[in-house]
């Protein structure tokens, strides 16, 4: 008799569908069916990619050099441009051999954990967390250990909390500033304190800096390796062009780190996906080395919208939204709305609340359950001013 195996492996069966993509897909299908849904669910800029970047890509399409396989770790010119950007924005001097170009920041996240973790290794994950991290950690055999910071601490974890969660098995600290989903940014002092603690305990740090250029009120998101240079030998920086340059669809990200880790990740990538599409890499070179004024225009627009949405949400009784200093998300604490009856329904979790909001006023938000504990909603303000105002007005009416 044939041995019966499960059809799908346990490792892959355990992966949950991306909750953010799921809500976004539901909102888009309702919109396609003609419903006037206002969606705050997407995690991407609403701007088109700046013209000079698109033009560089158009020129690259007709150049036969881009029609062939290229080095798995990335085009030399792009690795050089990334090294220069890393020095400029993260204060870390690296050679191009310490850079690998990946298929989006997401692949950089996956490869970073796959490169560092052995089965059972623990990763400290400041929570609320971006929904992909625990899955990438688990796929690599690691164990995510959540360290929660609520709205009362602006969603920023402390050294004391991290220390309380550290064990013999802790190998990696995940550090994300600005954060998805909260938009919170660690101050230079907080970053330094956390970096020194990680250094003292010999931890690796994976620092996701994909939102580092989207910061407001004159704040700078100081890189943890700039704050604590001694960490450079055990830190992997994750970044990409998606958010800063409105290039989510082009799929270009990267990892920067010590040569041995980057070489190991390149070996992995050489079997996994090889080089990122050359046309996209050429576009990324134009993004990083070309004029940066469109980046500043987009940043200034987000800054303005951020104030608008925070004020609008905080006008609702029972909602507490800290003013975020980066990314393009707000993360209201909605525990004050739970257990009360709205339009005949009594939500007790943020998942139920998000459903109620979509059903009753056709506004899409992502519930906190996608990012850790219940009691929160994530709203992206990367959408047009009119839609942004309309959605907030609907929420104010529903919860009046
Ligand atoms: C914190 C964070 N890191 C990485 C990524 C990956 O971005 P991409 O794969 O589009 O480059 C995202 C995208 O949502 C993100 O929010």
Image: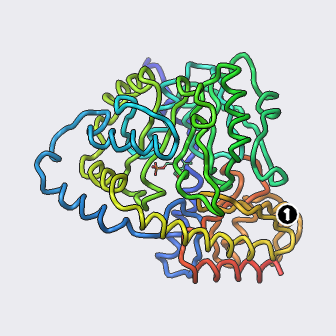
Q: Quadrant of the C terminus?
A: bottom right
* Spot occupied by residue 398 in the image (x, y as percentages of width and height): 77, 79
Where residue 49 sits, quadrant-wise, is bottom left
Q: Quadrant of the N terminus?
A: top left
- Residue at 75% across / 20% down in the picture? 167
**Side of 125 relative to 210 (left or right):** right
Q: How crowded is mark 1: few (under 14 residues within 10 Å), some or many (20 or more)?
A: some
- Residue at 39% across / 39% down in the picture? 83
Residue 46 higher or lower than 180, as above or below? below
SS of the residue under disc 1? loop
Residue most extreme to the left: 64
* Spot occupied by residue 98 in the image (x, y as percentages of width and height): 40, 29
**Side of 57 relative to 291 (left or right):** left
**Side of 272 relative to 63 (left or right):** right
Q: How many labels does the image show?
A: 1
274 or 399, which lies in front? 274
Residue 271 higher or lower than 42, as above or below? above
**Side of 279 relative to 46 (left or right):** left
- Residue at 69% across / 58% down in the picture? 367
Residue position for label 1:
338
362 or 2, which lies in front? 362
Check mark 1 vs ligand 1: CB closer than 8 Å? yes or no. no
357 or 198, which lies in front? 198
Colour setting: rainbow
* Spot occupied by residue 257 in the image (x, y as percentages of width and height): 47, 30
- Residue at 53% across / 30% down in the picture? 113
* Spot occupied by residue 316 in the image (x, y as percentages of width and height): 82, 75
342 or 379, which lies in front? 379
């Amino acid at each position: 008799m044939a041995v019966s195996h499960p059809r799908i492996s346990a490792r892959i069966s355990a992966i949950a569908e991306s909750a953010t993509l799921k809500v976004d897909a539901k909102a888009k299908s309702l919109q396609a069916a003609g419903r006037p849904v206002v969606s705050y669910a997407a995690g991407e800029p609403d701007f088109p990619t700046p013209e000079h970047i698109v033009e560089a890509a158009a020129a690259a399409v007709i150049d036969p050099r881009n029609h062939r396989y290229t080095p798995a770790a990335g085009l030399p010119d792009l690795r050089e441009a990334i090294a220069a950007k890393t020095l400029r924005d993260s204060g870390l001097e690296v050679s191009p051999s310490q850079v690998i170009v990946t298929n989006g920041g997401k692949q950089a996240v996956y490869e970073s954990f796959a490169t560092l973790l052995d089965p059972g290794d623990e990763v400290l994950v400041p929570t609320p967390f971006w929904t992909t991290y625990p899955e990438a950690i688990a796929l690599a055999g690691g164990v995510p250990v959540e360290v929660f910071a609520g709205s009362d601490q602006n969603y920023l974890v402390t050294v004391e909390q991290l220390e309380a969660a550290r064990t013999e098995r802790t190998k990696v600290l995940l550090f994300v500033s600005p954060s998805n989903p909260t938009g919170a940014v660690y101050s230079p002092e907080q970053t330094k304190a956390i970096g020194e603690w990680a250094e003292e305990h010999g931890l690796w740090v994976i620092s996701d800096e994909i939102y580092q250029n989207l910061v407001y009120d004159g704040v700078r998101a100081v890189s943890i390796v700039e704050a604590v240079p001694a960490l450079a030998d055990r830190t992997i920086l994750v970044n990409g062009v998606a958010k800063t340059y409105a290039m989510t669809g082009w799929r270009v990200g990267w990892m920067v780190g010590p040569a041995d880790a980057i070489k190991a990740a390149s070996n992995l990538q050489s079997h996994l996906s090889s080089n990122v599409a050359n046309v996209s890499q050429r576009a990324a070179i134009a993004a990083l080395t070309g004029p940066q004024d469109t980046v500043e225009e987009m940043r200034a627009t987000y800054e303005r919208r951020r104030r608008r949405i925070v004020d609008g949400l905080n006008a609702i009784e029972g909602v507490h939204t800290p003013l975020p200093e980066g990314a393009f998300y707000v993360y209201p604490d909605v525990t004050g709305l739970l257990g009360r009856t709205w339009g005949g329904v009594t939500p007790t979790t943020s998942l139920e609340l998000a459903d109620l909001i979509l059903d009753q006023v056709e506004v899409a938000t992502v519930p906190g359950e996608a990012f850790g504990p219940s009691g929160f909603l994530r709203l992206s303000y990367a959408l047009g001013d009119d839609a942004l105002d309309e959605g907030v007005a609907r929420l104010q009416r529903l919860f009046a």
